[in-house]
Amino acid sequence: MHKKIARKIMELTAVEKTPLIRNDSLYYKDKSWQRALFLVFAVISFVFIVSRLFVLQVVKGSYYKAVSDENRIRVEVVKAYRGVIKDRNGHILAQNAPSFNVKLRKDSSNFSSALNKLADFINTENFLDAGEFLVFDNVNRDIAIKIESNFSGKDVLVEASSQREYLYPNEFAHLLGYINTDKVGMFGIERTYDTFLRGSHGSILYEYSANGEVLREIAKREPVNGGDLTLTIDSDLQITAYSALKKAIDRTGAIGGAIIAQNPKNGEILALVSIPSFDPNLFSKGISSAEYDKIVSNPASPLFNRVLMGQYPPGSVFKIVTASAVLAEKIVDKNTRVLAPQAINIGSFVYRDWKAGGHGEINITRALAESADTFFYKVAGGYSDFPRSLGPEKLALWARKFGLGAKTGVDFGFEEMGLIPDPAWKKEIKNEQWYIGDSYITAIGQGDVLTTPIQVNQMASVIANGGYLLTPRIVEFGGGSVRGLTLRQLAEGSDPLSPLVSSAVIETVKQGLKEACELGGTGYPFFDFSEKNNGIKVACKTGTSEFGLKNARYEYQTHAWFTVFAPADNAEIALTVFLEGGGEGARDAAPVAREILDVWSLSDLDSL
């Protein structure tokens, strides 16, 4: 039994050995094919790798070299200093105060921790995104020193910088304007002359090591600092004007106010004030949302420049134009006498004078001195006892000759044009007929007439300088200024040396304005000016203009105007004061002008 089992096992074993030998041969054949396949794959891979190396090193070698160079070569901007702004006497109004910038590398491996650590020293919510850096500007010296000692120069850099500083912020805000945190002029002189003040930045090309250290300076372009700007402004006069106007607004409860003073001989602006005002330093430092909202939500509009943009009915100061027009057109002469009663009636309409009892029979100089409404009603629009009249078209024409209803062309800021109505305008805009009553109220600066304070001052300057319409300007030009070079007539193509009106007209109107500031005139705060100011005589005109809706007493609110020039016969200054909703011209605006001219009279007239 056992032998049979053993034999069976041997037979089975023998059967398995034969095919094993044969399959082993086939096995080795299969392995050779795989080696061949592997060899082909290896050759293909080698060719691919070599071709890629060829592309990387030869075909695109210059590209990747440039990328590498960019990683180790960086350009840093060297900022130019903004030009200083000075007044006519060299007093600095806007300058660059020292400050520091803190710069955090955005590609730093420690960015998050460095940013959190910086928050212990500065407000990290306000920053400038400047390429590879976050920049935190306007850091004071003490904080900058602490940051420099607490951080490595690799992640955080501290560099010297400057911050715009306005030395008399509220007094000069509407004149100088401000720059933003990018050092760009956004308002006022800073905006208009931004290119001149800004200059041009320089740059330095540095090579850095792999760990961010500077290896060498490759190239450098020096910055060109901005130019310094000298203004025609007298800072002492400006500060005095601001203070006087602020007190008047507080006293009268006016909404706001404006003052403009010029040298009528050449158009140079000596003072320009608008209240409410604001602090421009807030904007140059980086104003917060809360601070900005507080300014723009103020109903009195602190950012609104009332001198250039405020459009208001001028009231009786407009009589300067009406008087000049009726004289020039020979409706009256200096001897013509016209009855100026308390009121005149046209049908059912009554046109009243401000003075109870009227003025009696007067000539044009007394009409200006006493601001006789009914006199100007008659000469401008006519009446039964004075049938000849100027008419609305000619009145509008003369108003425009005096610069009203158009921008003055002043060399900074935004201006409004105002409005001089005439029959064509009324028909086009209101689709209404022009009536004699329209001529009456236009003649005294009411109705639809609108002017800006700078226009009113320019108008008064025409009388002060002998009949020339000068373009106001605020930047001092080299070599001084000549009357012919600043005339707006030059830009309009007319003869720059031809006055708007004759000397006879000028002298008659000027006489009326002199009498307005003397006993019996409306400018009573100036009655003793000559006596107390070395014999200096002035010429002036008051204005009280109605606006808005009547109150419970059936009275309108009123703006207060006062315009004056001095010395009357050789004027060095023309000054206009305006109080928005501030009462009456003589009572409320004239004392402001008196305070300013009292200070001005002590200065050297030749310096203006």
Image (cartoon, rainbow, N blue to C red):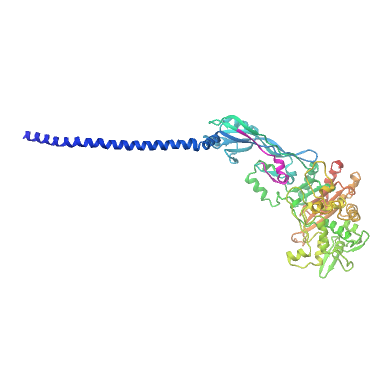
Q: Is 308 located above or below residue 95 in the figure?
A: below
In the rendered image, the residue lying farthest to the right is 335
Give the magenta range. Answer: 183-205
Picture quadrant where residue 339 is located: bottom right
Looking at the image, residue 35 sits to the left or right of residue 521; the answer is left
The one nearer the camera, 150 or 74, is 74
The one nearer the camera, 607 or 575, is 607
In the rendered image, the residue lying farthest to the left is 1
Quadrant into which the N terminus falls: top left
Q: How many labels does the image show?
A: 0
Verify whether residue 192 appears in magenta: yes
Picture quadrant where residue 533 is located: top right
Image coordinates of residue 270 in percent, x first then y, are: 80, 45
Image coordinates of residue 305 in percent, x first then y, are: 73, 50
Q: Is 18 located above or below residue 405 in the figure?
A: above
Looking at the image, residue 32 sits to the left or right of residue 82; the answer is left
User: Can see residue 394?
Assistant: yes
Verify whether residue 372 appears in magenta: no
Looking at the image, residue 401 sits to the left or right of residue 210; the answer is right
User: Can see residue 588?
Assistant: no
Image coordinates of residue 112 in percent, x first then y, are: 53, 37
Image coordinates of residue 325 in percent, x first then y, are: 86, 59
Quadrant into which the C terminus falls: top right
In the rendered image, the residue lying farthest to the bottom is 347
